[in-house]
Image: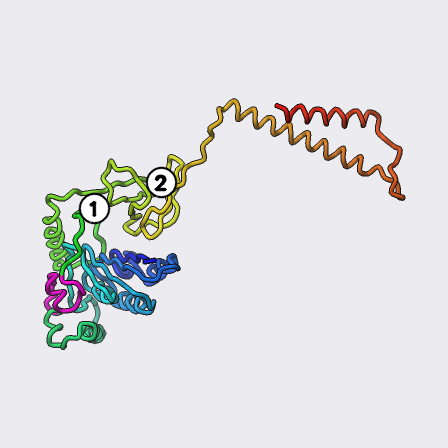
Amino acid sequence: MTGNIYISGQIGTFDGVTGISLADVISQVKKQPKATAYNVHINSEGGLVDTGFDIYHYLCSLGKPLTTIGSGIVASIATVIFMAGKKRLIKENTQFMIHLPWGGSMGTADELEQFAGQLRVIEKKMVGFYKKVLSVQEQAIVPLLKNETWLTPNQLSALGFTTASQPVKAVAKAFINPNFTMRGTFTERDRHWMESLFTRVMGKFKNAHIFNKVVQDATGIEIDFTDLPDDAIIEVGAMATVDGMPAEGEYLMPDGYTYIFTAGELTEIIEPEEESAPAALRAENKALKRQLSIIKSEVMALKRQVGSRYTLDGKKASVRKPGESDRLSGMKQYLQNKNRK
């Protein structure tokens, strides 16, 4: 069985924005205990260096065949996670960018010098990593990192980032959420390259169908079936996200159906319990059940009375309540008549 791990969006949590963490990746792995290999799907603009390396080392420690698949965008520290795969593929139109680590700081000259020193340590770590996994000299990789290079599929293959010379072809589709607002502290340079990226990517989708079927569960949670047209029927096998992450667990729908997801895939649809009998018949059935319960209680009470009619030597006592025998006989006849109906 090949499991699926999804790394989507920001790596790590910062500037008040919650991103994917090492714990999130571990949780996905634990939910697929029978997996003998994993496909790691990456669609991320990057994030915190330490978190990225933590995820990379964890994936490598699994000791199972890994295939990393880039889609949408693989940039910054996400490219490090991408290198965890023995087999590394990108889908068509995927944007792939490497650069040196950067950040911002405020303070005195001494404090800024201290920050610069810390940044150079991280920079050295990044350069050393690329040198090792790509088997290239420092002089070959540093200029690319300094220039924030966007690499083409041919360049990715030539440098060793990918193990296939051609990107994986897929049906062009896009999900546009009009309510999405980019959050965080971005410089004008960041905004420029993100906007230019969006323009380039969407330019390739001019003639593509944009699929997005969104439904709400009974509590109002939105489930996005991004591969389905709005008028499509939801069936087992459909992929969905909730709040940008692969859907997971059970969701009770307003019509009574229950959707069960595993790693973003709809694995089961449980139908609601149907009350096929007419309302009048159901009411009569409940009344009969109540009567039967009362009768059973009376029978048990009589049995206890009869069972207590013993003397110390084990013989039945001769004491009997008036009409007791007639009552038992009549109760037995009543139950027989009920069973014939």
What element does badge 1 sit on?
loop
Q: Amino acid at mark 2?
A: Asp
Rendering quarter of residue 334: top right
> Residue 325 at what x, y percent from top left?
81, 27
Check residue 217 in the rendering and tell me which mark sits there, or answer none.
2
Q: Earlier in the sequence, mark 2 or mark 1?
A: 1
Q: Which residue is drawn at the image coordinates 10% and 49% (left, top)?
A: 204
Question: Given the image, on which type of amino acid does mark 1 rest?
Answer: Phe
Magenta residue check for 166:
no
Q: Residue at x 89, y 44 (%)?
A: 313
Q: Position of residue 242 (x, y in %)?
A: 31, 48
Give the magenta-colored segment's residue range.
146-165
Compared to 101, does 92 lie above or below? above
Seen in the picture, residue 280 relative to 226 is either above or below; the reply is above
Residue in the picture at 12% in, 49% down: 202
Q: Is residue 155 left or right of residue 314?
A: left
Give the label on residue 84, or none. Answer: none
Name the quadrant containing residue 322: top right
Q: Is residue 113 visible?
A: no
Residue under pointer 1: 175
Residue 248 shows in this picture: yes
- Please indicate whether residue 340 sits to the left or right of residue 85 in the image: right
Q: Secondary structure at mark 2?
A: loop
Q: Nearer the viewer, residue 236 or 202?
A: 236
